[in-house]
Amino acid sequence: MPFAIAIGTDPLIPLVASMAIPAGINEADVIGGLRGKPLEVVKGETVDLFVPHNAEIVIEGTVDIDQTRSEGPFGEYTGYMTSTRKEQPVFHVSALTHRDDPILTVVCPGEPVDDHLCMSVSLAADALCVLRQNNIPVIMTYIPPIAALHLLIIAVDKKAYQGNDIIQDIGQTIWSTKIGTLLPKILVVDSDIDPTDTNKVLWSFATKCHPQKGVVFFPSTVVFPLSPYLYPEEKKNRKCTTVIFDCTWPSDWNNDYIPQKGSFDSLWPKEIQEKVLSNWTDYGFSNYEVE
């Protein structure tokens, strides 16, 4: 079987390659749509395959699936050496082409944050799409790169939800899809919390997630076997319990019972806020955002 490996390409190529694009859709077409112009490719020197014309290095050849050699272990996206040494098919190289003074951009994945975690962007977008397709009122989804694809943060508008249990529905939606195998933990926050603001997310988790009622488990979920915390049997079966941390106010709480934020914006009358802000520098303080 012929192969061509392109190293040092347009950053959109590895990004789109990591996306959960539906079957039958050409990845090159997606790249062209995002770029606003076609992806330029050239024919390989020794194989009947097309490669990106601006790649730093291209390795061509054939793969012999009947011939193997011992390979590994390999650094994985988790930041750990979680894969083992095992037999893998042999690649026979027939050509190696490169630009003048090529840049070798490929490295072994290491501790986060590393370049391979650009997948966080596409996975979060995929999660947002599938949740909205299932009528879940999601404001935003975010996968912190530091979490190595193990945590999805979702901001939702619970008041706009027409179903019975938004947390159960989020879990069933995400973990019934391919992308869910890479996302074993989900943290759900209210719409007033920015998922990209780590301080606000941690504050919400620490103060709003009930130690019992706010932790919802989903047993026997299909998971990716490279998660470091998995036991040998779980890796073999590719199944483990996944979890959602509900950091939202309960739907059955009255507004009078829900605590008010202790912020400048919520505790002080509007006229006082405007007076303070308009005279802030006159008071001798420097400009900064007041919350």
Image (cartoon, grey):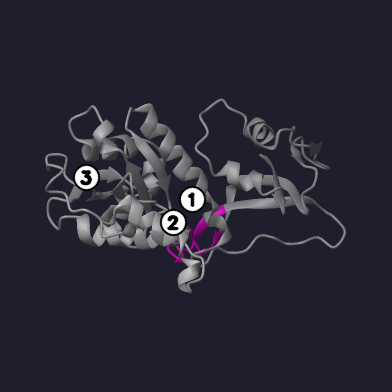
Q: CA distance from mark 3 to mark 1?
A: 22 Å
Circle 3 residue: 218
Task: Verify CB contact (< 8 Å) between mark 2 and mark 3.
Answer: no
Residue neighbourhood size for the residue with mark 3, other residues' Cα within 10 Å, grouped as few (<14), some (14–19), many (≥20): some
Q: Which SS class for mark 1?
A: helix
Disc 2 vs disc 3: which is toward the camera? 2
Task: Verify CB contact (< 8 Å) between mark 1 and mark 2.
Answer: yes
Main SS, magenta region, reads loop
Give, as a three-letter code, the residue at label 1.
Ser
Q: Which residues are magenta?
A: 70-88
Circle 1 residue: 120
Q: Is residue 165 left or right of residue 130?
A: left
Give, as a three-letter code, the residue at label 2.
Pro
Which residue is at a point 21% across and 60% down the rendered structure image?
Answer: 207
Up-down relation of residue 266 to residue 35 (above or below): below
Q: Which SS class for mark 3?
A: strand
Task: Verify CB contact (< 8 Å) between mark 3 and mark 1.
Answer: no
Q: CA distance from mark 2 to mark 3?
A: 22 Å
Residue 188, position as x, y percentages in the image: 29, 47
Circle 2 residue: 144
Q: Quadrant of the N terminus?
A: top right
Q: Residue 35: in sight, yes or no?
A: yes
Q: Is residue 262 left or right of residue 152?
A: left
Q: Quadrant of the C terminus?
A: bottom left
Q: Which callout, 1 or 2, points at the residue further toward the start of the chain?
A: 1
Q: CA distance from mark 1 to mark 2?
A: 7 Å
Disc 3 vs disc 1: which is toward the camera? 1
Residue 239, position as x, y percentages in the image: 28, 47
